[in-house]
Image (cartoon, rainbow, N blue to C red):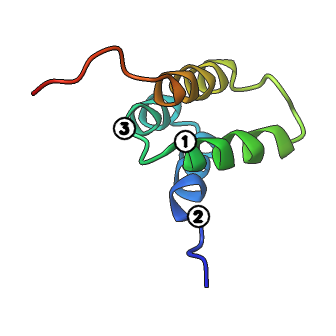
Amino acid sequence: MARANEWAGKVLALVKGGNSAAAIAQIKVAPSVKDLRALQTALAALQPAGRWRDVEVAVSDNIDALSAPRLHRSP
């Protein structure tokens, strides 16, 4: 049985509660791209698209950052 995506729900609750700064901080330390995509889908499902523009930008930026291959790795 697959685990429920609790992280996206918790961050979405922060966004809905009006604490976008805390939501962006959580987005920056997201566990995986899968969790970020789940959050992006949940944000898109909300009616007023573009209401939390800064959060949407943070999600897309961090998806790009986590998806990109690393240029180098530390030893």
Looking at the image, is 62 positioned above or below residue 27?
above
Q: Amino acid at mark 3?
A: Val
* Quarter of the image where the C terminus is located: top left
Q: Residues within 10 Å of mark 2 (few under 14, many from 20)?
A: few
User: Residue 29 in the image: x percent, y percent?
Assistant: 37, 37
Q: Amino acid at mark 2?
A: Asn
Secondary element under disc 3, as helix, strand or loop, is loop
Q: CA distance from mark 3 to mark 2?
A: 15 Å
**Residue marked by disc 2:** 5
Q: Residues within 10 Å of mark 1 (few under 14, many from 20)?
A: some
Q: Residue at x 60, y 40 (%)?
A: 15
- Numbered badge on residue 33: 1
Dot 1 or dot 2: first in sequence order is 2
Q: Amino acid at mark 1?
A: Val
Contact check, label 1 and label 2, Cβ < 8 Å: no
Q: Nearer the viewer, residue 19 or 35?
A: 35
**Residue marked by disc 3:** 29
Query: Which callout, 1 or 2, points to the residue nearer the camera?
Result: 1
Q: Residue at x 58, y 53 (%)?
A: 8
Q: Residue at x 41, y 31 (%)?
A: 28
User: Residue 69 in the image: x percent, y percent?
Assistant: 45, 23
User: Residue 30 in the image: x percent, y percent?
Assistant: 43, 42
Residue 21 falls in image quadrant:
top left
Q: CA distance from mark 1 to mark 3?
A: 11 Å
